[in-house]
Structures are given as C-alpha cells and as structure tokens.
C-alpha cells in the first residue's frame, strides 16, 4: 500500500505530531485500517486526555505495532487511523492506545499532506458503497 509508505515517510521527516487526540477521533465510530487489510472500525472511549480505540477488525498486531490518527494538514480534518506492524520510534508522542481482543498497541497522531498519502482512485479509507443498500 503506497499510501501507508508515504505516511511512514512523513512521520520519519518529523511532520507535526499531535499532542492530544483530535476531537473527531472521540466522537463516534472511527474508520481504522491495518495495512494490508480491509477497513474496519474502532469505537473510542476517553480516559482523561487520552483515547482508547477498541478495534473491531482483523489483523491487529500483537507487538510490535502502532496506530496513527491521520489529520489532513491543509483543512485540519481527521481522516481515520492506519495501523502498522512495525516498531514505533520511542520519541513519538502517544495520544492513546488501540485495544484489541489479544493486544494493546500505542496510538499516535500526525498531520499529513493528505493528497500525497491518499489516492482517490484507491483511497486509504474507502467509503461504503451506498448504492448497494438501495437495490
């Protein structure tokens, strides 16, 4: 997934990490994707100024692994959470955790140049096909 590699590149370049969870992250179901798997969802709960995302999909890594809340840096819109199966840098500031049935991994937040990490013809977080529901 090329978009996931671009997210890692932007993290390595020191793009702006978030010091706290974006408000939209704590406001309902969150589109969440483990790299290489389909989009799933997570349900947030707040614990002080941190968020715990309860992951409901497949492929959540045991360890190492981490999640990244992606915020479009041009319009400050939260897009979703992308999960990686690699060791995070200890210098990344945690904003919470991703909690699965068998593991808990750290969650970070970053502002990304959205058009460089997402391709509309093959989006990171595709929207469900609403036409199928009306047939």
Image: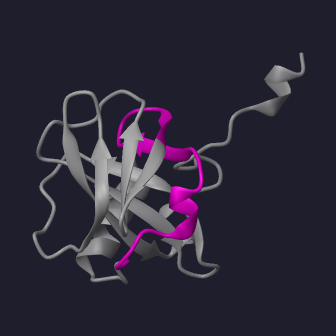
Identify which residue, 46 or 59, lies in the foreground.
Answer: 46
Q: Quadrant of the C terminus?
A: top right
Q: Is residue 79 visible to the viewer in this orientation of the structure?
A: no
**What residue is at 34 percent from the left and 79 percent from the top?**
17
Residue 33 percent location from the top left of the image: 43, 42
Q: Which residue lies most toward the front here?
A: 48
Number of callouts in the render? Answer: 0
Q: What colouring style does the render use? A: one colour
Residue at position x 36%, y 27% in the image: 58
Is 5 rendered above or below residue 9? above
- Residue 23 screen position, x and y as percent: 55, 68
List x then y, in percent, for residue 120. 65, 54
For the record, the magenta segment spans 18-42
Task: Kindly identify the residue that appears in the image at 40 percent across and 33 percent down.
Answer: 37
Is residue 6 inside the magenta stretch? no
Where does the image place residue 98, in percent across and percent down from the top left?
31, 47
Foreground: 13 or 93? 93
Residue farthest toward the top in the current orientation of the protein = 135
Please, is residue 38 above or below residue 134 in the view? below
> Is 62 on the left or on the right of 129, as rendered?
left
User: Visible in this render: residue 37?
Assistant: yes
Q: Residue furthest right?
A: 135
Magenta segment includes 21? yes
Task: Determine the residue positioned at 30% across, 60% down.
Answer: 96
Position of 37 with respect to 125 (left or right) is left
- Residue 39 vs 75, above or below: the answer is above
* Quarter occupied by residue 61: top left
Asked which quadrant contains residue 55, the reply is top left
């Amino acid at each position: 997934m090329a978009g996931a590699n671009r997210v890692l590149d932007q993290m390595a370049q020191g793009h702006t990490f978030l010091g706290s969870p974006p408000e939209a992250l704590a406001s309902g179901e969150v589109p969440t994707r483990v790299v290489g798997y389909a989009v799933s969802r997570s349900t947030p709960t707040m614990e002080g100024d941190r968020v715990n995302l309860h992951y409901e999909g497949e492929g959540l890594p045991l360890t190492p692994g981490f999640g990244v809340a992606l915020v479009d840096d041009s319009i400050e819109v939260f897009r979703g959470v992308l999960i990686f199966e690699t060791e995070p840098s200890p210098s990344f500031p945690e904003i919470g955790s991703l909690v699965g049935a068998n593991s808990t991994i750290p969650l970070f937040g970053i502002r990304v140049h959205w058009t460089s990490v997402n391709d509309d013809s093959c989006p990171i977080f595709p929207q469900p096909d609403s036409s199928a529901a009306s047939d």
